[in-house]
Amino acid sequence: MLPESVLACPARVLAQAQRVQFFRDGFVRLPGFFAGPAIARLQGALGELIELSRERPGNDEDYTVAPGHAAANPRLVTVRRVQDMHPAFWEFAARSKLADLAADLVGPDVKFREAYINFKRAREGEAVSWHQDFPFFPMTNRAMITALVHLDDVSEDMGPIAVVPGAHRGPVFDHYDGAGVWSGRIAECDEALAGVPRALAQPGPAGTVVIFDSCMVHGSAPNKTARNRPVLIVGYAAADAFAYTATPPSMYSRRTWQIVRGRGAAQAHFEAVPCRVPPDWSKQDYVPPDWPEGSNVLGPKSPTTEMGAQGIRKDKL
Ligand SMILES: O=C(O)CCC(=O)C(=O)O
């Protein structure tokens, strides 16, 4: 759906002015969108995933850990596919008002893309390079969005997500380096054109949601504080947006592209979004290890894993 058609559908959780703002600026920030109990449930689930990580000695398909990670001292960088790791995260991604928010921005038929948590540990959590999401998994149209949910209070000096207002209306930048190798980031020489100097950090209390367009230029600074910055990242797309390249194995789950609002699409909607295609993710790592903290280093492939009765993956029970 094009923005005019989305805006013509009744809003579920946003004011119409906020939807208009989203299409104009490419993002919207909703301080404290989720109240205490919803965030407390996610924090509890996160605590369980941290406990599970004590049994994981190093990087694997679910966890990326920092050097020194040990059972006695979990040092997590990223937990992937949290929708499969704990039922609270799937419930949140599929049944909470986050999916309604997605429907307000991509149209009533919404599919789930992925969910993961970036920790950005106290004093150690590094910057995330400037990038756009679209070139990682290009779609037949641009109605794909990413929501960051603050699982704790995030101040300016904790490395909150930063976005460049209006950058989604500019070009999709090359995410390869000068030698033609995938870098997963906008080249430094393109940063000014991408508007990076105008980027605005998006701090906020726990429960804040920052949601942005797939072509938004975004990144984040290091965490300079003594507190961790756990953020849940959930991606959605319009039902009629179809990926035209392989789904990265590090993202794949049986829930990838599952409809969470409305109905599936009988036809793809096509919109020209010129974009250099990413590498074939079925054959190479999602992002090279030179990304900060190796936070997207690919673990062993595990495309599907059966779920146990509690919704926690069987290999974790
Ligand atoms: O954790 C962050 O600050 C940014 C996350 C992000 O942009 C990503 O994972 O693509």
Image: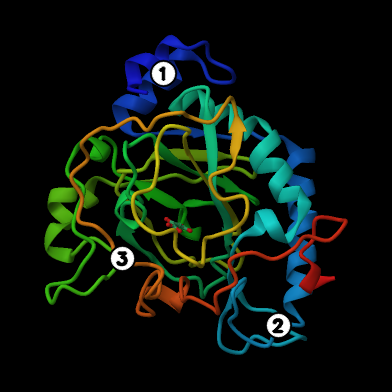
Image disc number at residue 184: 3
Please say if 216 is above or below 11.
below
Please say if 63 is above or below 86.
below
Q: Nearer the viewer, residue 120 or 90?
A: 90
Say left or right for 150 vs 3. Answer: right
Local secondary structure at mark 2: loop
| Number of residue marks | 3
Q: Position of residue 197 (x, y in %)?
A: 21, 51
Residue ID at (70%, 47%): 90
Mark 1: amino acid? Val
Mark 3: amino acid? Gly
Residue wearing tag 2: 56
Residue ID at (53%, 73%): 123
Q: CA distance from mark 3 to mark 2?
A: 27 Å
Residue wearing tag 1: 6
Residue ID at (56%, 34%): 31
Say left or right for 156 vs 75. Answer: left
Q: CA distance from mark 1 to mark 2?
A: 44 Å
